[in-house]
């Protein structure tokens, strides 16, 4: 039996960050939470930040756009392009490309979210691939583990109410 990580690149500790957990919601709810803006608004940013805007064109080459708003009103926009869309299994996007696979000016990461059934829950793996050591280090110092862990906790709490 193949698993969700069988066809993924092996994480390079110098370039990549990984968050892996088993969560107690099924993959279908994780998928819905990740792919529908009306759900993403409830969990995508660590509180007290909010998701001010979100656009999803769920297909390879489609747009993945978010605007996060901080408690003081500051905003951080992120535009990206979906690379891999496998319902209830995997979602990959990058900010190295814009919709339609157009090159972006300032790439930072490629993200791969994988989900695999595990009992009544999900084995969840978030892999953040970076182009160089400095970008990986900057992302880690920005709080990757704490931030992505917090939003996963928020996703789980929200998904239980869906």
Image: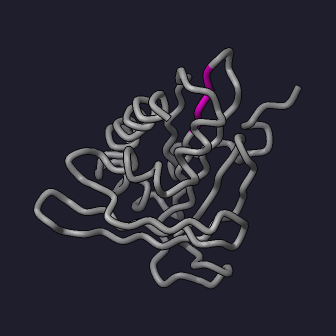
Q: Position of residue 76 (x, y in %)?
A: 30, 68
Q: Is residue 50 left or right of residue 108?
A: left
Q: Main secondary structure of the magenta part?
A: strand
Reply above or below: 66 against 46: below
Extreme residue in the left direction? 72
Reply above or below: 27 against 53: above
Bounds of the magenta segment: 121-125
Residue at x 65% of width, y 52% of height? 91
* Closest to the observer, 6 or 120: 120
Residue at x 45% of width, y 51% of height? 40
Q: Is residue 143 left or right of residue 30?
A: left
Extreme residue in the front direction? 162
Extreme residue in the right direction? 1
Residue at x 51% of width, y 62% of height? 109
Q: Position of residue 48 (x, y in %)?
A: 20, 48
Q: Position of residue 26 (x, y in %)?
A: 62, 27
Residue at x 58% of width, y 33% of height? 124
Q: Position of residue 93 (x, y in %)?
A: 60, 61
Reply above or below: 14 against 108: above
* Closest to the observer, 108 or 135: 108
- Quarter of the image that includes the N terminus: top right
Q: Is residue 142 left or right of residue 14?
A: left
The colour mode here is one colour
* Closest to the observer, 105 or 90: 90
Is 127 part of what is drawn in magenta? no
């Amino acid at each position: 039996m193949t698993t969700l990580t069988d066809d993924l690149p092996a994480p390079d500790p110098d370039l990549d960050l990984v968050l892996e957990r088993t969560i107690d919601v099924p993959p279908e709810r994780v998928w819905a939470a990740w792919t529908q803006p009306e759900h993403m608004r409830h969990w995508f940013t660590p509180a007290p930040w909010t998701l001010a805007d979100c656009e999803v064109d769920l297909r390879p080459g489609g747009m993945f756009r978010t605007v996060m708003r901080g408690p003081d009103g500051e905003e951080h926009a992120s535009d990206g392009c979906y690379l891999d869309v496998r319902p209830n299994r995997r979602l990959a996007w990058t900010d190295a490309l814009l919709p339609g696979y157009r090159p972006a000016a300032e790439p930072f990461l490629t993200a791969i979210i994988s989900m695999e059934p595990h009992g009544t829950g999900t084995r969840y793996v978030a892999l953040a691939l970076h182009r160089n050591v400095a970008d990986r280090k900057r992302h880690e110092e920005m709080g990757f583990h704490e931030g992505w862990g917090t939003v996963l906790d928020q996703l789980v709490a929200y998904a239980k109410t869906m």
